[in-house]
Every structure is written in C-alpha cells, then in structure tokens.
Image: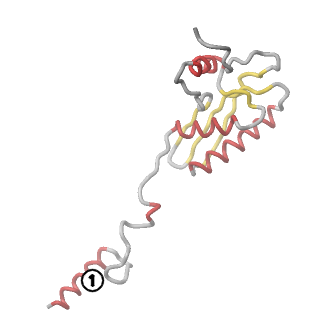
C-alpha cells in the first residue's frame, strides 16, 4: 500500500508541473525569482533622474521656464524647502518605454545644437541604466539664454524678510 501511495503522489506532481520529470522537483512559483511580479516606476522618479542627468551637462544653466524658476527659487529659500530636481522635466512612463520633455536655460556662447545632443545622450543613458525603460524620445525646449552679466534668479540673494 505504501508503494501505491508514493506512486500516486508522484503522478500528481507530474500532472501539476508538466515537463518537470521527477517528483519533488525544485520548480516553485513558475520562473526565475527575479522575474516574478511586476515593477512600476512613477513618472516623478524618471523626472528626477532626467533632471539630474540634464543638469550634469556643461552649458545647461537651469531647468524650467521663467515662472517655474522664479517660484522654485522662492521655494528653495524657504527654511526646510528642498531644491526641485525635476523642475523643467515632464515624463510619460509606460510599462517598457518613456518619453521626456525638458525645458532648459543655456549659458550664452554654448552651441545649442551640440548641447541638445549632449543632454539627450546623458539623459537617455541615465534613465535607461537606472530604470531599464526604453527612452523613445527626449524633446528639448530652450526657454532662455543666461547672459554673463545677468543676475541669477536661482541664486539666493540674501535672507527672506
């Protein structure tokens, strides 16, 4: 009787897991542990990565349009406030792809065409490396040029009263 019970258990396992072969095989959960489940990445995560990568490129003075930079500069001066690294970046994130829109301010004298290429390369490399998402496009809008003698509105001018 014991032999028959063991044989039935073996047949049941083979029926539940076709192609496993032996009873008690180590297949559990269906697939490699790293591929079980789903990973979702928020738009804000991709925006932060892209914002930091864009700022790393020499010739990018600031990110965002005039109004966003002004409000951001005020917010940065508030005690306990943090600098928004995603300012000037908009991401649309899907399951396997993402598209990015960046608004930048360039320093005077920098070739905008070369800068745009460098920003795209740096942003795409950083986002794809860190997230595994395919970056399908990086659209750049140059909203301003920082002249050498212009006052920098992103720099704190002193304490708020």
Observer-nearest residue: 8 or 157? 157
Residue located 77% across and 22% down the image: 145
134 or 145, nearer to the observer: 145
The residue lying at 65 percent from left, 22 percent from top is: 65
User: In the picture, residue 111 is in which quadrant?
Assistant: top right
Is 108 displayed left or right of 127 in the figure?
right
Q: Look at the image and name its color scheme.
A: secondary structure
From the top left corner, tell me how far across and down residue 62 is, in percent: 69, 27
Quadrant the N terminus occupies = bottom left
**Above or below: residue 26 compared with residue 77:** below
Along the viewing direction, whichever of 73 and 18 lies nearer the viewer: 73
- The residue at the far left in this view is 1
Q: Quadrant of the C terminus?
A: top right
Q: Residue at x 57, y 43 (%)?
A: 98
Residue 87 found in image quarter: top right
Question: In this figure, which residue is indicated by the disc labeled 1?
Answer: 10
Q: Residue furthest right?
A: 109
Compared with 71, 3 (above or below) is below
Tell whether 16 sits left or right of 121. left
Residue 81 relative to residue 67: left or right: left
Residue 45, how many percent across, how many down? 53, 39
Q: Residue 60, position in %: x, y?
A: 74, 31
Against 152, residue 4 (above or below) is: below
Q: Position of residue 147 (x, y in %)?
A: 81, 20
* Horizontal side, residue 102 vs residue 7: left or right: right
Q: Secondary structure at mark 1?
A: helix
């Amino acid at each position: 009787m014991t032999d028959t019970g063991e044989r039935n258990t073996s047949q049941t396992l083979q029926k539940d897991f076709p192609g496993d072969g032996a009873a008690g095989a180590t297949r559990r959960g269906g697939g490699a542990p790293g591929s079980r489940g789903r990973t979702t990445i928020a738009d804000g995560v991709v925006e932060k990565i892209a914002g930091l990568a864009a700022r790393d490129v020499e010739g990018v003075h600031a990110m965002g349009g005039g109004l966003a930079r002004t409000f951001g500069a005020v917010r940065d001066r508030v005690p306990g406030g943090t600098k928004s690294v995603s300012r000037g970046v908009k991401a649309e994130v899907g399951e396997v792809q993402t598209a990015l829109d960046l608004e930048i301010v360039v320093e005077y004298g920098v070739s905008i065409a070369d800068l745009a290429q460098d920003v795209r390369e740096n942003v795409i490399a950083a986002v794809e490396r860190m997230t595994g998402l395919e970056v399908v496009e990086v659209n750049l809008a140059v909203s301003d040029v920082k002249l050498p003698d212009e006052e920098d509105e992103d720099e704190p001018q002193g304490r708020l009263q």
